[in-house]
Image: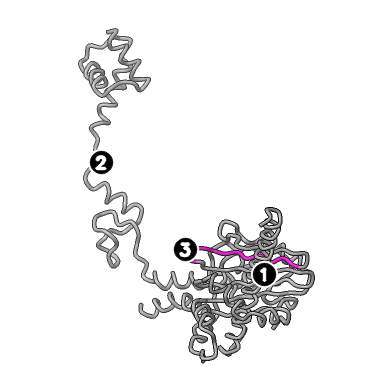
Amino acid sequence: MNEIRTLLEKYFLAETTLEEEKVLADHFRSGEVDAELLPYAAFFEYIAEEKQVSPGEDLEKRILERVGLETATVQGGGHGAGLLAPVRRLRFGYAAAAAVLLCVSSLFLAVQLSSRSGDGGKVTVPRGLVSATIKDTYDDPEKALAAVRHALLVASTHMNEGKNITQKNMSRLNNSWEAATGN
Amino acid sequence: MYRSKWIFFFPLLLLGTGVFAQDDAIGKFFSKYVEDSRFTVVSISPKMFRLMSKVNWDTIPSDLKQTVSRLTSLRILSTETTPGVYYKEAMARIDRKEYEELITVRSDKDNVRFMIKEQGDVIHELLMIAVDKDDFTIMSFVGNIDLDKLSRLSSDMGIKGMENLKNIKHK
């Protein structure tokens, strides 16, 4: 009996193994139950009964029907066969996606163009997304080429300024060195 | 069904026209001031560079030809209004993780910085940011940039180059 009590305690602490639970169930079914433990007998009987109940093979189908989803055999076929066809195929899927894309991009462009007011306000644009576009300054490729040459020359000259300054100083250093070492 | 597919792709087509997109920090800086009347803007798109390659190149020295043929875009912003302020703003916007400082030449008269964006061994973008007491200019060259060739361009020109520098007018 003490064994049973110990097991019961364990059970209500959810610490029993399946085997131990079986022991308990068997014990209470056997009819040789202590008077003190009779309430538990009813409990275990209930548990045992519930275990017998199974949902039946068409449970999935019944659930789906309740929820209102169709199975794979209806509406132009979904992904994957079987009873669980998760999403109904939208007939206007492409058009809907296109409409959303158009709306989003035009909204976005509108925001960009309106924020380009140059009033010193913050331009907060997420990185990596297309922001405003800049028009070509020249229509004539020859003029454009002239501008590119000009710009390259400016950049090149500035770059060489640095080089020249360095060279000048290096030669001054060299002169000083030679003077100091008497070469 | 077929028509719906076209609607889907049309917004994407809009991006591929003669203008080109600015989506980096410097691009945002350009976009901010492109309509500002205080600024002079030069913008040459990849499309224009492609057109340029069909122009008559006979009178153009080969180093220059090669340099230009490897560029894909050029943007220049310049102003004479509060140059120091814009210089600071431009420098603040440049992401040091993307752009590395190449050369800085600072004298009492001016301050010129070159910054590059590298992808592997290739220099993908060269920024020149220059300021003196009257002027602020920022230039962005995008393409496959050969620094060696670039620096040779002005030394090839020699004296002429220096004179041109003195005569630089904003277009």
Instruction: Tell me whether marks 1 and 2 sit on the same chain.
Output: yes
- Chain letter for mark 3, please: B
Mark 3 vs mark 2, CA separation in Å? 67 Å
Q: Is disc 1 placed on a helix, strand or loop?
A: helix
Residue B90 visible in the current orientation: no
The quarter of the rendered structure image containing the C terminus of chain A is bottom right
The residue beneath circle 1 is A161
Kind of element beneath mark 3: loop
Q: Tell me if residue A174 comes above or below residue A43 in the rendering.
A: below
Image position, residue B24 (x, y; %)? 57, 65
Q: Residue at x 61, y 79 (%)?
A: B43
Indicate left or right for B48 with A113 as reference: left
What is the chain identity of the residue bearing mark 2? Answer: A
Amino acid identity at mark 3: Asp
Q: Contact (CB < 8 A) between labels 3 and 2?
A: no
- Is residue A107 positioned above or below B96 on the image? below
**What type is the residue that disc 1 sits on?**
Glu
For image coordinates 41% across by 79% down, the residue present is B6
| Residue position for label 3 | B121
Q: Is A91 left, or right, of B139 in this rendering?
A: left
Q: Residues within 10 Å of mark 1 (few under 14, many from 20)?
A: some
**Residue, disc 2:** A55
Q: Is residue B116 visible?
A: yes
Secondary element at image label 2? loop
